[in-house]
Image: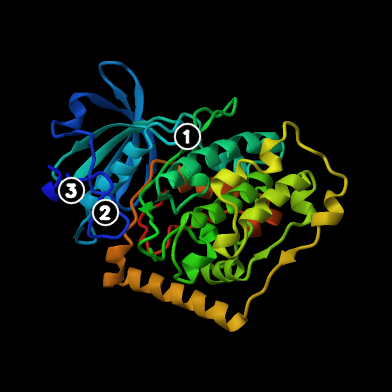
Amino acid sequence: MIPEECRQSRFRASSRSGLLCHIHSPIHSEPFSDRYMLSPGHELGRGKFAVVKKCVEKETGKEFAAKFMRKRRRGQDCRMEIIHEIAVLELAHSCPWVINLHEVYENASEMILLLEYAAGGEIFNQCVADREEAFKEKDVQRLMRQILEGISFLHKNNIVHLDLKPQNILLTSESPIGDIKVVDFGLSRIVNSNEDLREIMGTPEYVAPEILNYEPISTATDMWSIGVLAYVMLTGTSPFLGDDKQQTFLNISQLNVSYCEEDFDTISYSAVDFIKTLLVKEPELRTTAEDALHHSWLSQGDILNLSCLQSTVKMPAIVAEEEDSSSGICADVDDHDKSDLEGETVTEELIVMASYTLGQCRQSENEKQTEPKSVSKRFKFEEPLLQEIAGEFIY
């Protein structure tokens, strides 16, 4: 039963800043197994607090993804975080680019979200594939339009995702390449102009500078992550990845990003310009989701093969900030990470829920297949900040 105080308004936040606490979906208490059958050997992903399994509705034979989410984590009742995720999915039900919520079940220890099954899996596979099998620029154009339309819808409803990355973008089919579905709203928050939202959250390679600086979060925070995502989808490399978290954070805070010829030799200048409008340190100067949809790269019908690309983008574009300040930022984040592992109270405000996505499930397998020369910039897909990870699979 949902607390009575949360039934008054759909957009009323809970005691934890940025969370919704009212849902319309009925929560079924009867056994999940009465209506659904789990598909043997089809575990789609596993995290510390959740597991996602493929299942079939007995009556219709329709496939779904069942997301089993523990209500109690680190000794804390986290039911309201799950309610928030359900509320966001409900709010976005009319958006074709957000995963659809079918039903919700609850038992004594967990809640079960029945989600649309995206047969193509996450875009991770294409991002790390050899060039012959990787996304073509035209593929990325089409998928990026869909991603931006989905994020624009969320932003118009004052929702920020805060964990946009290849693991959290699924495909409806793998071959031919289907449409996208944005998933995992466990870190999402409601933002408004009347209250600053400041939290250390996200996945290291994709977090915006303002996250590291503990500055207010806004819709622009998602746009930085989309810039990183576009870079990754086009080149198969991670622009800010360092040897460790601290180096990655330093690269982000100093905007150490390269548009070298080796990575961009087949990419149009218009695509590079699109990325540059997003990887801007000052949030207020980044393009919005709506404006990004009107960028020349996405509005043009055909990809321009500009001969001037090599001379334009082969030199690294680096903007350096004061070293002492950046080092301080990284040290602060490491301190937060350390306190999480020690179970300090700061984690109460930063509990992360598992997502419906395959994520890192095949990381070790892909690392074995990756060419040694590209390992340094390939994905590590580290866990979201301040999340404890247990087991081989995280997502």
Where does the image place residue 196, in percent across and percent down from the top left?
38, 65
Of mark 3 and mark 1, the one earlier in the sequence is 3
Image quadrant in which you'd find residue 343: bottom left
Q: Is residue 174 left or right of residue 52?
A: right
Residue at 46 percent of width and 69 percent of height: 215
Q: In whole angstroms, how far apart are the C-alphas of marks 3 and 2?
A: 8 Å
142, 342: nearer the viewer: 142
Of mark 3 and mark 2, the one earlier in the sequence is 3
Residue underneath mark 3? 6
Viewer can see residue 136: no
In the image, what residue type sits under mark 1?
Answer: Trp
Question: Mark 1 packing: few (<14 Cα in 10 Å), some, or many (20+)?
Answer: many
Secondary structure beneath dot 3 equals helix
Residues marked 2 and 1 touching at CB (< 8 Å) = no
- Nearer the observer: mark 3 or 1; the answer is 3
Of mark 2 and mark 1, the one earlier in the sequence is 2
Residue underneath mark 2? 13
Q: Is residue 75 placed above or below 116 in the rendered structure?
A: below
Residue at 11 percent of width and 47 percent of height: 4
Residue underneath mark 1? 97
Q: What colour scheme does the image use?
A: rainbow
